[in-house]
Image: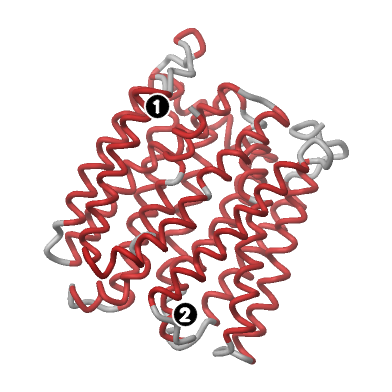
Amino acid sequence: MLFALALLSATAPLATDMYLPGLPIMSESLGTTTVGVQLTLTTFMAGLGAGQLIVGPLSDSWGRRRLLLSGTVVLALSSVLCATAPTIEVLVAARLVQGFGGGIGIVLARAVIADRARGNSAAKLFGIMMIIGGAAPIVAPLLGGVLLGPIGWRGIFWVLGAVAVVMTIGVLAFVPESLPPEKRHSGGLSALARNFSYVVRNRRFVGYAATFALGFGAMFAYISASAFVTQDLLGLSPGQFSMVFAANSIGLVGANVVNTRLIGRIEVRALLRFGVTLLFTSGILLLTAAIVAGTERWVILPLLWTCVSSLGFVIGNATALGQSQVPSAAGTGSAVMGASQFGLAALVSPLVGLGGEDTAVPMALAIVVCGGLALTSLLTLTREPRDRTVGE
């Protein structure tokens, strides 16, 4: 079941990282600009946020399994539409629907774990799921770089459609219903409104959710700009970019492994604080390097690796700590976290492209801003005299 849930959670890296090496080629193929192609990332992230925000709360009333199956079917059909899109406008719209279907799987994968585990156990499960799902950002850009030549960017979307079919089979075979009828909320729209109110009025939940979303915002600043920075600015080939992207993903997975092994020995909130501090510090160094030595690979690439790796101590820990604040509305809590996560990513994506293709400064600046705000949220909104959540 954990492998099936991890595959669902890997929707975002699979559907973004696999076609990242082809972004420059797509802009030529569809006769559009860099910003136009980056809109396919923006709408995908917006769809991910919308799918989570709508379906997460519904699952607190309807259960998880049927909605999971619906999401994987939508993901498969929309991937076919992406593969056959004749214009950039159709592709942008298809990516919105693809994101919506993927968002269902992501939000409910988190909710299923929150249904079944608490405390350090939940933190470890989220960490293990990230380790398993972390293979996606390692394999996806390498696979995309290999497939881009033989089958083109359209063929990559056909592959994504096939992966969505595998997801559907995984849910059918391995993921039982985790929310029994007696634990579901009734009352229609009024119950949904109460759940939202309960979640967003919890100050500590909001702090952890903001830390989670801003950490992902920093990651997506890197994701959306990395193909252009490494290829157009640093002069790497698409294959070399895929190798760099995979190396950064290995750093992220390695940090997740270390983080998971430390849970139980070190308080989860302390591990989260370390990760956010490392993200902010390495982001400042990256911004300085982008201004002073913007085309030096040996400076830019190691700092990018550090920024990405630091998130191994952020995403899983912030998820577990946030979900632990709202155990009676796990679907709604997961939806709010996911919507804020991908909504921010949708905002960051076009902003990092405004500076053009010959500088890494916008990407580095976005990482610094997200890292600084994440650290501020963690230190101000989640602080209490005694932490009574995960890790106690």
Q: Residue at x 61, y 89 (%)?
A: 291
Please tell me how crowded label 1 is: few (under 14), some (14-19), or many (20+) other residues with Cα within 10 Å: many
Left/right placement of residue 126 relative to residue 52 reads right
Q: Position of residue 108 (x, y in %)?
A: 45, 32
- Closer to us: 204 or 227: 227
Inspect the image, locate mark 1, and give the three-letter code of the amino acid beneath it: Leu
Q: Which mark is residue 287?
A: none
SS for callout 2: helix
Going by the numbered disc 2, the residue's amino acid type is Val
Q: Are marks 1 and 2 in contact (CB under 8 Å)?
A: no
Q: Is residue 277 left or right of residue 24?
A: right
In this view, the residue in front, 175 or 96, is 175
Q: Which residue is mark 2?
A: 229
- Identity of the residue drawn at 67% across and 43% down: 317
Which residue is at the front of the view, 333 or 17?
17
Residue 380: give x, y in percent of width and height. Answer: 76, 51
**What is the quadrant of residue 320 in the picture?**
top right
